[in-house]
Image (cartoon, rainbow, N blue to C red):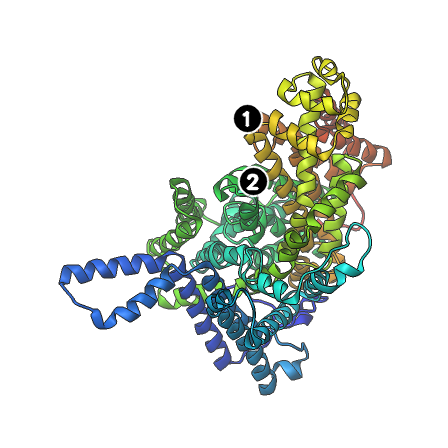
């Protein structure tokens, strides 16, 4: 592979605590993996738009030349079907390719003796081929299964069993044991375990044949909607990011960050934040972001005087934000668009300001630490600013501009990504590093390898997701969250945050989001909607068409709701109403835009909270990657990055309690302004330092100011919080600089 590519860890030991092994590839096997990855990449590009363009061009050329190609008609029919394949076939081909690739890259047993042996390689390849063949066989048998009245015969039973077993084994290798355990529990619950459980979770159970059929052919199954997202949008965007990095955009990003942020206090640390934010626009992977920028920014921070653990923590926390930064967010964002039916362009539009706010929160930690240890700005970065800006314009901003322009024009995300890839290649010929065929090959191979783990996960997680609507578990869990929270949105938020924290200890980001979204998003959405209803009831603005619904529980409801009322009284009336009345109120009182905003706020909250699996010990691969670069203790680095990434918990509060994802522009600016000061106050409280060391009283004041600045829907709290923070800042600044003994500058 090309030298510009970020080196991936070759074994589990390089990441300290990571238990996911990567097979060392010899020269011959490496060449095979490269060309096999290129073939997978070309197949997906062909299925996602290029095939249709090529066939139309070929038909036009044949007509112009008057060629008769009747002999090639069977081949043409096959190519046409592959250019616009049925979703099940496309998703099965997607899984087949990545099953074989994952089986080669990730050995079944982590021990070097097995991973490097010929027998181990043959066994792993066999598992991948069996998984691929089983899936394709079942898709080919679909019509025969329907002709038999949805009854399976022995070969289909065998293929289905092998498909599930091999899929679980591949996910175990790439993400650990949690997902396979969840899948086994879900399938058991849907078949034999549900009838044995008493209480609200009792389920009558389905036959194994029904569960197997739905697991393969259902909309939420193995080859359903989530797999379709992986086979189209996810892989195309990640390949686009790989082309950008191969073209030299990674170094251009770091140079641009040094020019922009290097002259500020804490410059090298701010370089890491800015570089990770810019890399996040093209990566969508926190680990890849860390590996790409961390090899430059972490040594830079260490040389400038930052402690090694802090440098690694900053890089991990900033790289985690890469999955929050449009236009290429993590795979969960594409799944969110599918779940909510909200266009991806809308999601990336509303996600920009919150992402900037998160990176500001990391930058505040960097600045505070720089002040604490007495670092000075880096005034000599040795770069020509004009040349750096021109290089960034051609290599980064122009391709992203093409991508965004295509999305805004109305192209599908896959078409837009394909056109942007062409723009990257064309733009590179305007620089001193034109992309030639070997570079295109390496970019395709790198992009496909980067998506391998996600592709296998998004297919197999369908086994779990399929059980949720089939058994009605989502409705039960949603009602339980609402009951445990006592109709309190903040308690529900805390419950979901704790669940995310626990899941983050063993699940990758995308899996954590999917699990939380299918189980808790309905409850969170309903509580956000209830918040809007409470405000209307308290203000006396509830429409009469909705107010009459309360007559079922309170004969005097119309009189009470005709005028403003106390918030507690409104909450009591709403609590007395049942789910049916709440549904009527929601439809009668709130507009479609408000309901869409509530749905988006719920999913975006869960999406943000799920990102903490990148930095939550004991399994935090992003932190471990940064620790490997910084040569620090993995677990200690994980806790450091978890502390710095606290914006993951504070910013989602704005989604739940404000219109930060869909309000008027001036409201968005106001929310952003006060929240930024609130994050600075919280960071100072955690670090115990502002402009100088803070005592316990000052830290308590900082936390109080942060709480006031985040307090929703009460106009005076923001002003009071900002005043309190500015007074604290002035007081702390006047205390004068106190040198800290033993810390180098």
Residue 328 image position (x, y, % from top left): 51, 49
Residue 438 image position (x, y, % from top left): 39, 68
Foreground residue among 172 and 695? 172
Q: Residue at x 38, y 62 (%)?
A: 46
Asked which quadrant contains residue 401, the reply is: top left
* Secondary element at image label 2: helix
Earlier-in-chain disc, 2 versus 1: 2
Foreground residue among 644 and 607? 607
Residue 552 image position (x, y, % from top left): 73, 24
Residue 649 is left or right of residue 348, and the answer is: right
* Secondary element at image label 1: loop
| 217 in relation to 114, above or below | above
Give the residue number, with chain letter if any, for mark 2. 351
Q: Residue 216, labelled with which disc?
A: none
- The reply to whether callout 2 and callout 1 are in contact (CB within 8 Å) is no
Q: Residues within 10 Å of mark 2 (few under 14, many from 20)?
A: many
Give the residue number, with chain letter if any, for mark 1. 664
| Residue 422 appears in the figure | yes
Q: What is the distance, in whole Å, between disc 2 and disc 1 at their CAs?
A: 15 Å
| 279 in relation to 122, above or below | above
Q: Residue at x 58, y 67 (%)?
A: 8
Q: Residues within 10 Å of mark 1 (few under 14, many from 20)?
A: few
Residue 467 image position (x, y, % from top left): 65, 57
Asked which quadrant contains residue 722, the reply is: top right
Q: Residue at x 79, y 45 (%)?
A: 740
| Residue 380 appears in the figure | no
Residue 554 is left or right of residue 287, and the answer is: right
| 616 in relation to 96, above or below | above
């Amino acid at each position: 592979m090309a030298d510009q590519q970020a080196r991936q860890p070759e074994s589990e030991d390089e990441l300290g605590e990571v238990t996911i092994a990567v097979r060392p590839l010899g020269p011959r096997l490496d060449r095979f993996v490269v060309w096999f990855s290129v073939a997978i990449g070309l197949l997906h590009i062909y299925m996602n738009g290029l095939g249709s363009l090529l066939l139309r061009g070929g038909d036009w050329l044949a007509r112009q030349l008057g060629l008769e190609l009747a002999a090639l008609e069977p081949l043409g029919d096959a190519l046409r079907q592959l250019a616009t394949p049925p979703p099940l076939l496309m998703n099965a081909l997607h899984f087949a390719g990545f099953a074989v690739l994952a089986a080669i890259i990730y050995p079944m047993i982590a021990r070097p003796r097995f991973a490097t042996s010929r027998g181990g390689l043959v066994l792993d390849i066999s598992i991948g081929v069996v998984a691929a063949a089983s899936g394709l066989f079942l898709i080919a048998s679909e019509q025969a299964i329907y002709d038999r009245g949805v009854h399976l015969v022995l070969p289909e039973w065998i293929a289905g069993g092998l498909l599930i077993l091999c899929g679980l084994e591949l996910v175990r290798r790439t993400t650990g044991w949690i997902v396979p355990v969840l899948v086994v529990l879900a399938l058991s619950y849907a078949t034999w375990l549900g009838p044995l459980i008493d209480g609200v979770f009792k389920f009558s159970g389905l036959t194994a044949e029904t569960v197997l059929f739905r697991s393969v052919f259902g909309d939420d199954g193995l080859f359903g909607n989530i797999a379709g997202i992986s086979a189209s949008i996810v892989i195309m965007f990640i390949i686009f990011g790989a082309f950008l990095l191969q073209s030299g955009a990674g170094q251009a990003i770091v140079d641009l960050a040094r020019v922009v942020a290097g002259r500020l206090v804490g410059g090298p640390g701010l370089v890491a934040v800015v570089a990770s934010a810019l890399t996040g626009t093209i990566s969508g992977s926190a680990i890849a972001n860390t590996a790409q920028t961390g090899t430059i920014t972490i040594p830079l921070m260490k040389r400038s005087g930052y402690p090694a653990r802090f440098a690694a923590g900053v890089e991990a926390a900033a790289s985690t934000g890469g999955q929050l930064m449009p236009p290429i967010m993590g795979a969960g964002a594409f799944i969110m668009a599918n779940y909510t039916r909200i266009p991806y362009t809308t999601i990336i539009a509303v996600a920009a300001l919150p992402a900037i706010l998160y990176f500001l929160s990391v930058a505040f930690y960097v600045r505070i630490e720089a002040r604490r240890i007495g670092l000075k700005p880096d005034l000599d970065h040795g770069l020509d600013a004009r040349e750096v800006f021109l290089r960034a314009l051609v290599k980064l901003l122009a391709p992203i501009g093409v991508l965004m322009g295509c999305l805004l024009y109305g192209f599908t995300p896959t078409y837009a990504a394909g056109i942007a890839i062409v723009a990257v290649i064309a733009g590179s010929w305007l620089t001193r590093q034109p992309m030639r065929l070997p570079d295109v090959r390496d970019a395709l191979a790198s992009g496909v390898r980067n998506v391998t783990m996600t592709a296998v996960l998004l297919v197999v997680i369908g086994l779990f997701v399929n059980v949720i609507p089939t058994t009605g578990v989502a409705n039960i869990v949603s009602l339980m969250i609402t009951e445990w929270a006592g109709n309190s949105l903040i308690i529900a938020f805390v419950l979901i945050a704790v669940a995310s924290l626990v899941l983050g200890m063993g699940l990758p980001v995308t899996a954590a989001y999917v699990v939380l979204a299918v189980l808790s998003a309905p409850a969170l959405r309903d509580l956000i909607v209830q918040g809007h209803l409470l405000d209307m009831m308290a203000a006396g603005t509830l429409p009469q068409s909705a107010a009459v619904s309360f007559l079922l529980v309170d004969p005097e409801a119309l009189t009470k709701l005709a005028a403003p009322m106390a918030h507690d009284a409104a909450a009591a009336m709403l609590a007395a109403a049942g789910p049916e009345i709440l549904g009527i109120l929601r439809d009668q009182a709130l507009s479609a835009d408000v309901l869409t905003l509530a749905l988006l706020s719920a999913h975006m909250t869960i999406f943000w909270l799920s990102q903490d699996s990148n930095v939550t010990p004991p399994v935090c691969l992003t932190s471990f990657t940064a620790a490997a670069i910084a040569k620090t203790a993995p677990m200690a680095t994980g806790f450091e990055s978890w502390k710095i990434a606290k914006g993951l918990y504070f910013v989602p509060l704005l989604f739940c309690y404000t219109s930060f994802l869909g309000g008027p522009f001036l409201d968005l600016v106001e929310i952003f302004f006060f929240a930024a000061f609130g994050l600075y106050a919280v960071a100072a409280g955690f670090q115990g330092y502002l402009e100088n060391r803070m005592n316990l009283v000052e830290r308590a004041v900082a936390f109080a100011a942060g709480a006031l600045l985040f307090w929703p829907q009460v106009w005076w709290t923001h002003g009071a919080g900002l005043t309190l923070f500015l007074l604290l800042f002035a007081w702390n600044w006047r205390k004068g600089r106190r040198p800290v003994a033993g810390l180098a500058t």
